[in-house]
């Protein structure tokens, strides 16, 4: 029988992920350092979450999210002067390195093979102009200690981290922002229902019973970080559902803003849904080259609202 998990039951009945205490400590130290310097801090969650089907995990359920939205937004938040806690799915897109990853723009295509006897690898001249500003921003974020990364893989890890990171950010008050772009699984298999070892096929069909993941945004808004500025995302594939569902989320959780996006048009069209307002942000389609990313406009719009909200006390 399937259980209806409350957030409280989830956090008390499931076992904490092994690295939770260590990540939480890093976040506390980061927050204390940034807070002492009066800096705004944003938590950016990014990428999909997995749902393991075995304890010794061979198979898992996953979703489409590559973490592009989160990684790009993190870069623009850094540019806007924020310190960033980048909580992302391991091996999904990462700020700065995303420009040269995977198959679209492989890093090795930038590098020239050295002549015989030479031990220095050079960036080919055609790529220097594109690479330099990215390399500079990457090193600057590192040098100034403005970017903290916190990895997760499973939905259980994500939810435990979200709670602890949010609580660790509470001392920032209004200077803290939550920008929840991760695509979080709505269903999971609780640990006590997982097969210990690889599920055997034996030529039989497999029936899975998944349980609903508890909604935790209400707890974040009401108790974990009650003074923070909270932005959630709503992804739909049917455009008729987008605004009603974003509005429903705002009503249910009482946070500040929902960014609505459609799977098919998410890279060049989003809507900012606030209690009394909808604001569309649209890029020309297809995007112009050199690319103007929609995340640049999203972050500018959100940072302005966050600042107005800080100033309104
Ligand atoms: O990564 P990319 O490929 O670039 O794609 C980006 C994106 C499309 C994934 C991103 O823009 C996006 O829309 N992310 C949110 C996807 C979504 O609709 O999530 P959701 O419906 O599961 O959650 C909506 C909100 O409910 C979330 O902000 C979340 O904090 C909240 N929630 C979710 C799960 C959960 N257990 N409890 C919650 O309260």
Image (tube, rainbow, N blue to C red):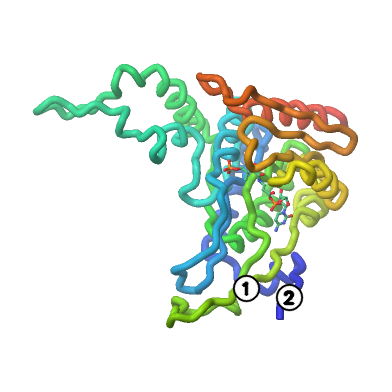
The quadrant the N terminus occupies is: bottom right
Residue occupying the far right of the picture: 276
To which residue does mark 2 refer? 3
Q: Residue at x 74, y 70 (%)?
A: 5
In depth, the one of 189 and 157 nearer the eye is 189
Counting residues from the start of the chain, the first of labels 2 and 1 encountered is: 2
Judged from the image, the secondary structure of the residue bearing numbered disc 2 is loop
| Residue 92 appears in view | yes
Q: Residue at x 46, y 36 (%)?
A: 98
Decide: is 167 above or below 258: below
Q: Position of residue 81 (x, y in %)?
A: 63, 27
Taking the image as shown, residue 103 lies to the left or right of residue 17, namely: left
Q: Residue at x 73, y 63 (%)?
A: 214
Taking the image as shown, residue 120 lies to the left or right of residue 5, namely: left
Q: Position of residue 63 (x, y in %)?
A: 57, 54
Mark 2: few/some/many CA within 10 Å (<14, 14-19, 20+): few
In depth, the one of 196 and 234 nearer the eye is 234
Q: Quadrant of residue 23?
A: bottom right
Decide: is 226 above or below 300: below
Q: CA distance from mark 2 to mark 1?
A: 10 Å
Q: Position of residue 91 (x, y in %)?
A: 46, 49
Q: Position of residue 193 (x, y in %)?
A: 60, 79
């Amino acid at each position: 029988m399937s259980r209806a998990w409350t957030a409280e039951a989830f956090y008390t009945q499931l076992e904490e992920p092994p690295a939770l205490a260590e990540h939480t400590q890093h976040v506390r130290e980061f927050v204390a350092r940034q807070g002492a310097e009066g800096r705004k801090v944003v938590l950016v969650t990014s990428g999909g979450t997995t749902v393991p089907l075995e304890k010794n995990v061979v198979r898992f359920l996953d979703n489409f999210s590559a973490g592009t939205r989160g990684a790009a937004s993190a870069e623009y938040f850094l540019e806007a002067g924020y310190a960033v806690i980048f909580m992302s799915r391991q091996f999904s897109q990462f700020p700065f390195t995303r420009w040269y990853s995977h198959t679209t723009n492989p890093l090795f295509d930038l590098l020239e093979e050295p002549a015989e006897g030479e031990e220095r690898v050079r960036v080919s001249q055609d790529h220097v102009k594109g690479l330099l500003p990215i390399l500079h921003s990457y090193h600057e974020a590192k040098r100034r200690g403005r970017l903290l990364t916190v990895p997760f893989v499973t939905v259980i890890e994500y939810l435990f981290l979200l709670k602890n990171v949010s609580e660790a950010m509470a001392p920032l008050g209004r200077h803290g922002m939550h920008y929840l772009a991760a695509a979080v699984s709505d269903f999971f298999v609780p640990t006590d229902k997982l097969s210990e070892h690889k599920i055997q096929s034996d030529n039989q069909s497999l029936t899975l019973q998944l349980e609903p993941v508890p909604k935790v945004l209400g707890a974040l808004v009401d108790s974990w970080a009650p003074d923070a500025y909270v932005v959630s995302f709503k992804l739909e594939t049917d455009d008729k559902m987008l605004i009603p569902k974003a509005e429903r989320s705002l009503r249910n959780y009482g946070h500040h803003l929902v960014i609505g996006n459609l799977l098919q048009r998410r890279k060049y069209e989003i809507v900012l849904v606030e209690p009394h307002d909808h604001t569309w942000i649209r890029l020309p389609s297809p995007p112009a080259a050199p690319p103007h990313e929609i995340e640049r406009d999203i972050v500018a719009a959100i940072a302005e609202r966050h600042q107005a909200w800080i100033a309104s006390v």
